[in-house]
Image: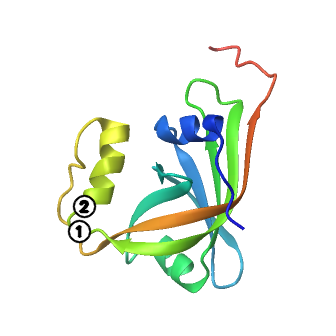
Amino acid sequence: MARKLNDDMKRLIDGANFAHLATLQPDGAPKVEPVWIGREGDRLLIASDRKSLKSSNIERDPRVAISLVARENPYEQLLIRGRVVETRDDAALVGLDALSLAYLGKPFPRRKWPSRVVFVIEPSMARHYVSPLVDPRA
């Protein structure tokens, strides 16, 4: 069952905070890497090279998990589990450029890629949490 995202969850995703995407390797071991993340309604968007290990993992098993923390307060977090429900061709870099505009303020500088895709993730579980801890360096 798809999970609706609340306003705090949407704010964190829309705020160009770095996320960590976990996919499953062929032996079941998790693989985690930092990613840019975007949103279409309650679905999440992540761009990748179609030939990457994360793409191969997702093609074999669409289950994913995402962890995201706020840049301004690393004790504010968003945890999501879900599955990739669509893989969009992104040869024109439309999806990658949209993410790059959010994170870098300009289109993605590297224009030549063998094959790009955007993964559309439907959350099945989403949890937002703000810890009472305070970063003493802030």
Check the image and report above or below for 138 versus 102: above
Three-letter code, disc 1: Trp
Residue drawn at the location 37% of the way across and 39% of the way down: 103
Q: List x then y, in percent, for residue 79.
A: 70, 49
Which of 84/47 is in front?
A: 84
Do the CB atoms of the residues marked 2 and 1 lie less than 8 Å apart? Answer: yes
Query: Considering the image in quadrants, where does the C terminus appear?
Result: top right
- First of labels 2, 1 by sequence position: 2
- The residue tagged 1 is 113
Question: How crowded is the residue under tag 2: few (<14 C-alpha within 10 Å), some, or many (20+)?
Answer: many
* Residue pictured at 30% horizontal, 41% vertical: 101
The colour scheme used to paint the residues is rainbow
Asked which secondary structure carries label 2, the reply is loop
Residue located farthest toward the right when viewing the structure as drawn: 132
**Residue ID at (46%, 58%):** 45
Image coordinates for residue 49, horizontal then vertical, percent: 36, 70
Residue at 45% x, 49% y is: 36
In three-dimensional space, the C-alpha distance between marks 2 and 1, rounded to whole angstroms, equals 9 Å
Q: Element under label 1?
A: loop
Query: Which of the 4 image quadrants contains residue 64?
Result: bottom right
Q: Is residue 14 above or below residue 82?
A: above
Vertical comparison of 97 with 70: above or below: below
What residue sits right under mark 2 in the picture? 93
Q: Position of residue 106 (x, y in %)?
A: 23, 39
* The quadrant where residue 80 appears: bottom right
Answer few, some or many: residues within 10 Å of disc 1's Cα (few below 14, many 20 plus, some between 14 and 19): few
Position of residue 19 in the picture relative to residue 63 (left or right): left
Residue 65 located left or right of residue 37: right
**Tally of numbered tags:** 2
Horizontal and vertical percent position of residue 20:
58, 52
Residue 101 or 74: which is nearer the viewer?
A: 101
Q: Amino acid at mark 2?
A: Leu
